[in-house]
Image: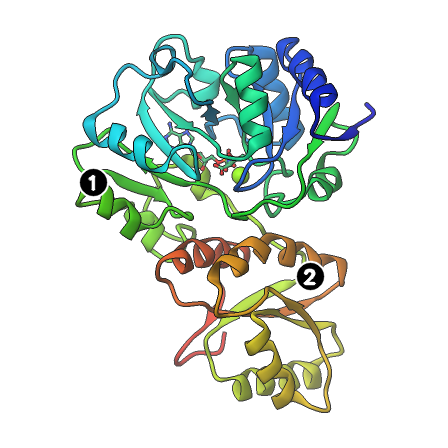
């Protein structure tokens, strides 16, 4: 299959609409990451999404809606706290888990009686969903296991030849997938951290829990079963052996010298400009490849560049990569959740060198 890459305009949106209506899939930009969309009520389209991504079918999909759309076709009820959160943070990077209606196919929800709903704020996503009037399921438009795509180029890398159309809307503003909040219990619970932070949610609706599986490291290598099925899978992993560390730059430099003494290999760094500079200074005259995520004083920039940075470590052919462990607060929680998954939980902090 030939994959077309088109800028977002009337022509390409019309084409996208026709494809979705006929049970095909279309990749499109959202403010978080690119999504691989299909009409939520098209069994054919849903199957194609799973197939193109190589995604396990027990991993449910998020239903994307546009302003003014009738949610009563999708969810049976919206509790008061849900209304408040929608009012406050929709359209935007927030997904809500609510009880599903009988109309929503079990294929969408992986057999669950709940459904994930989100209203993206990216103009292209709003236009596409708005003009079709169709609720659109859209997982991140990457091959399962790879970093989520934050540019049309990333989607092309993963899905060229497997899907008919990619709408190119430039780079994604947020860069990490939406925050997922479960509203089916009395106290809302974060199942996946994102740009709508715990503090932002608490400010709107009071007490909010965090799924213990999210807090137990990144949810991998743990006996706790995450409530969002997708959180249990290995994710975002670069080809190189990634290790996160919060040790002093001099120590990171020591590790690298030691690694190089043991065997010849391509070693790299991924982190903020400031951290990279310090490690490079400590390493001098030894040189390694650095992948910058921007300034450490702007966590939103780090978030925006993280997935692209992980892909770059592959392009550079890095075999062993040291990554900067960021503070796990506010947006740092979401960044570290993804970064630790990419590192399969490997980290060197305080005492140990693994
Ligand atoms: O920002 C985003 O949310 C992006 C863009 C494209 O909108 N989409 C995205 O979809 O990240 P995906 O499929 O990569 O991740 C969806 C996550 C998975 O972890 C899945 O298990 C969880 O949402 N999920 C979906 N439905 C659920 C449900 N009913 N209960 C619990 N978790 C659910
Ligand atoms: Mg995904």
In this rendering, is residue 121 above or below 165?
Answer: below
Look at discs 2 and 1 and give the one toward the viewer.
1
Badge 2 marks a residue whose secondary structure is: helix
Q: Quick check: can you spot residue 223?
A: no
* Residue 261 point in image, percent of width and height: 70, 86
How many residues crowd mark 2 within 10 Å: few (<14), some (14–19), many (20+)?
A: many
* Residue 255 point in image, percent of width and height: 58, 83
The picture quadrant where one finds residue 190 is top left
The picture quadrant where one finds residue 331 is bottom left
Q: Is 190 on the left-hand or right-hand side of 95?
A: left
Mark 2 CB lies closer than 8 A to ligand 2: no
In this rendering, is residue 236 above or below 100?
Answer: below
Q: Is 243 on the left-hand or right-hand side of 52?
A: left
In this rendering, is residue 217 above or below 5?
Answer: below
Q: What residue is shown at x 63% (from left), y 39% (from top)?
A: 142
Residue 313, labelled with which disc? 2
Which mark sits nearer the N-terminus, 2 or 1? 1
* Residue 126 point in image, percent of width and height: 53, 26
Looking at this rendering, what residue extends furthest in the right direction? Answer: 2
Badge 1 marks a residue whose secondary structure is: helix
Give the camera-side residue of 176 and 324.
Answer: 176
Quadrant of image for the N terminus: top right
Q: Is 350 on the left-hand or right-hand side of 318?
A: left
Image mark count: 2
How many residues crowd mark 1 within 10 Å: few (<14), some (14–19), many (20+)?
A: some
The picture quadrant where one finds residue 89 is top left
Give the camera-side residue of 250 and 17.
Answer: 17
Q: What separation in Å lies between label 2 and label 1 (alpha carbons)?
A: 40 Å
In this rendering, is residue 67 above or below 224?
Answer: above
Mark 1, residue position: 205
């Amino acid at each position: 299959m030939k994959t077309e890459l088109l800028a977002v305009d009337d022509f390409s949106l019309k084409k996208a609409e026709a494809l979705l209506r006929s049970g095909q899939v279309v990749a499109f930009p959202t403010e978080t990451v690119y999504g691989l969309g299909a009409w939520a009520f098209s069994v054919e389209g849903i199957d194609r999404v799973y197939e193109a991504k190589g995604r396990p079918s027990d991993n449910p999909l998020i239903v994307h809606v546009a302003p003014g759309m009738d949610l009563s076709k999708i969810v049976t009820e919206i509790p008061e706290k849900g209304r408040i959160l929608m009012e406050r943070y929709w359209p935007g990077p927030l997904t809500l888990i609510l009880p599903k209606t009988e109309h929503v196919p079990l294929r969408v929800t992986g057999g669950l009686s709940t459904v994930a709903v989100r209203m993206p704020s990216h103009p292209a996503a709003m236009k596409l969903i708005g003009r079709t009037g169709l609720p659109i399921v859209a997982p991140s438009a990457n091959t399962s296991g790879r970093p989520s795509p934050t540019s049309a180029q990333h989607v092309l890398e993963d899905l060229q030849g497997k899907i008919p159309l990619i709408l190119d809307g430039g780079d994604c503003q947020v860069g990490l997938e939406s925050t997922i909040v479960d509203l089916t219990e009395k106290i809302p619970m974060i199942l996946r951290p994102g740009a709508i932070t715990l503090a932002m949610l608490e400010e709107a609706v009071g007490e909010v829990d965090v799924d213990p599986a999210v807090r137990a490291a990144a949810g991998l290598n743990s006996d706790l079963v995450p409530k969002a099925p997708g959180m249990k899978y290995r994710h975002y992993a670069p080809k190189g052996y990634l290790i996160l560390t919060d040790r002093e730059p001099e120590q990171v430099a020591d590790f690298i010298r030691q690694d190089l003494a043991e065997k010849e290999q391509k070693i790299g760094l991924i982190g903020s400009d400031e951290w990279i500079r310090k490690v490079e200074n400590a390493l001098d005259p030894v040189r390694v490849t650095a992948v910058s995520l921007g300034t450490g004083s702007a966590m939103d920039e780090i978030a925006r560049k993280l997935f692209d940075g992980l892909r770059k470590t592959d392009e550079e052919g890095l075999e062993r990569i040291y990554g900067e462990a960021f503070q796990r607060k506010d947006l740092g929680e979401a960044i570290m959740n993804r970064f630790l998954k990419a590192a399969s939980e490997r980290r060197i902090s305080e005492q140990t060198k693994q």
